[in-house]
Image (cartoon, rainbow, N blue to C red):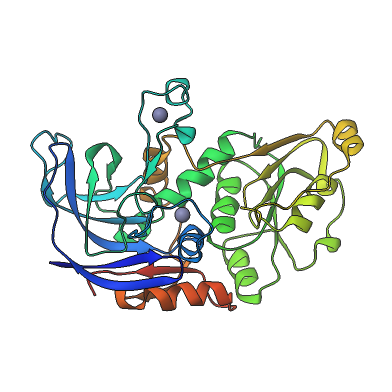
Amino acid sequence: MFKAIRIVQPNQINLVNLKLLRLQADEVLIKVMASGICGTDIHILRGDYIAKYPIIPGHEFSGTIEKIGESVTRFKIGDNVAVEPNISCDNCYNCLNNRQNFCKNWQAIGVTKSGGMAQFVVVPEKSVFNIDKLQFEYAAFMEPLSCVLYGLMKVNINPGDSVVVFGAGPIGILFLQMAQLQGAVHVSVLENLASRAALAEQYGANQIVRNINDFEKDDFDLVIDATGVISLMEQTIDLVRTGGAVLLFGVPPAGKKLKLEGMKIFQKGLTIVSSFTSVRNSYQAIALLEAGKIDVSGLISHRLPLSEFERGIKLIEKGDDDVKKVMILPQH
Ligand SMILES: [Zn+2]
Ligand SMILES: [Zn+2]
């Protein structure tokens, strides 16, 4: 038997005891050591995301291989691993065009299949990546970092560039570090929560601004929105330089429209890009975390047992100053 968080239907969470499932030949059983709560988990709990209820949430997690199916070749019992949640069929039009993030038969661990807010989880071998000696809590950032990397592959940061990131939550801080790593010499951050602004400073932001009106206009080669706040997304095109790019990464509320001046986009010759999940960025993410090029040690604010998952969600929803990544430690 093992403990798991089950979202029975929107807004209803139970801590349940479940029997271990039998493995298919191509599956592994993972003992979950660290599982990050993500905005998507909140959307699933609140019923505004495509999930299959009842569902065990959790798609940003790491752990140890406990058992392997008969045909598993890349892992042995005891290996430390992290999981790429999106499962593509590799046999639809989008998959066969290297757009696995839009797979027509898309499944995701923690969204449509049982996830990592549990002491154990069964996943297909192809979703699993070796993390060697990387700490479990850090490896739980493999998935969000993968998404950041995929977004940045769609825009260029050239050596010497100026970049601005809206939002200094865990994702914003990953963008800040990646921009520095890719040669930006100036990275500004927009953030009005004091502790997050302090975090951006700790991570080496050159400028931290609380109010968007305090930025110079036409001052950045790349503007990254990691907030999903409509009014901020609308102002990205004012801050970007002519010939520059805007990366819309934060998830905006459904049904809301952006007001952008078409003439401004045209005259500035802007590239406006969005980004949806990731496509095979896990090795890249692990390499950066392992090498210490991306430091996530300052991004975790809370460590909670499974039984306090709902408290973790509420902490994030309240958005108190000191809340960053809330990590669930299912073995505690
Ligand atoms: Zn996530
Ligand atoms: Zn597919």
Residue 284: image x %, image y %? 41, 39
Q: Nearer the viewer, residue 239 or 56?
A: 56
Q: Nearer the viewer, residue 287 or 22?
A: 22
18 relative to 244, above or below: below
Residue 66: image x %, image y %? 12, 53
* Left-right relation of 295 to 241: left
Residue found at x 50% / y 61%: 47
Seen as rendered, the residue at the extreme left is 70
Can you tell which quarter of the image residue 302 is in? bottom left
87 relative to 217, above or below: above
* Left-right relation of 229 to 298: right
Quarter of the N terminus within the rendering = bottom left
Residue 306: image x %, image y %? 30, 73
Q: Nearer the viewer, residue 21 or 279?
A: 21
- The answer to whether residue 293 of the structure is visible from this angle is no
Can you tell which quarter of the image residue 9 is in? bottom left
- The answer to whether residue 324 of the structure is visible from this angle is yes
* Left-right relation of 139 to 166: left
Quarter of the C terminus within the rendering = bottom left
* Left-right relation of 245 to 265: left
Residue 82: image x %, image y %? 30, 50
Residue found at x 46% / y 57%: 295
